[in-house]
Amino acid sequence: MKLAILGVGLIGGSLGLCLKRALGDQIYITGLCRTETSMNRAMDLGAVDFASSNLEKVVGDADFIFLSPPVLQIIPLVEKILPFVKSGAILTDAGSTKKFICESMKKILPPDIYFVAGHPMAGREKSGVSAATPDLFRCKAYVLVTEENESAAQIDARRKLIEILKFTDARFLTISVDAHDRNVSAISHIPHLAAAALVNLLEESHEDLDSCAKMIGGGFKDTTRIAESNADMWADICMTNTDAILYHLSTLE
């Protein structure tokens, strides 16, 4: 079995570590990395068997392709890899918003390549493969999106994907595209924006900044910890789940 991970960071790297621990030589994992340093790091940690920046070498002959870049980079990346993806391959993603991705995939994928939209509800405030851990998904919700009028082949593709992802020990949940984006806005996107706003509030304290910094205790640290998360990733989330985020921000205000 061959799995290609495109974006061997926190999520992609954790998946690789988990599956290699569970399946060993039964699975061969390739990883797409941008720099030689990240390639070597991913291989040294054991998250992938082979890492490269060459798309054909990474995705060629892959049974499963796991897409883990920021949301707005997913579709352009899929367009680049399509010439090298074999018939029957199953693509899935870890994007934090789903409607934009699902609608775009329908426009570009041929009928013999399947996409199962996914979202593991796991993460840390740190990024990069060095922050990856094989237990990242354990007991966490792992959402697989369902759509109306799914074909038997699409349902079978999701079943096959679950057979692999079950080794993460995650709790699988199926939900519609719209419900997913509303729900993650309330439980993930708004908390992050609130944490970032609190950090910005502190930075705008001007003459009180120094004394505020000296007085900070556990409450502020706990509340703002997730504000450290990757800014590019969160910019993409805000631009692809605008309606739900604006609604919940208004309600919070």
Image (spheres, rainbow, N blue to C red):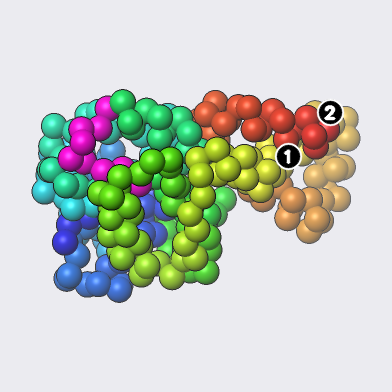
The reply, left or right, for residue 229 in relation to residue 89 is right
Q: Check the image and report above or below for 165 versus 251.
A: below
Local SS, label 2 = helix
Q: CA distance from mark 1 to mark 2?
A: 20 Å
The reply, left or right, for residue 12 in relation to residue 52 is right
Any mark on residue 206, and which?
2
Quadrant of the image occupied by residue 78: top left
Q: Which stretch did the figure color magenta? A: 108-116
Q: Amino acid at mark 1?
A: Ala
Q: In x, y percent, where is residue 188?
A: 63, 46
Q: Amino acid at mark 2?
A: His
Question: For the N terminus, which image quadrant?
Answer: bottom left
Q: Residues within 10 Å of mark 2 (few under 14, many from 20)?
A: few
Residue receiving disc 1:
194
Any mark on residue 41, and which?
none
Quadrant of the image occupied by residue 49: bottom left
Q: Check the image and report above or below for 18 versus 88.
A: below
Q: In x, y percent, where is residue 106?
A: 33, 31
Question: For the C terminus, which image quadrant?
Answer: top right
Quadrant of the image occupied by residue 156: bottom left
**Of the pair 127 and 189, the residue shown nearer to us:** 189
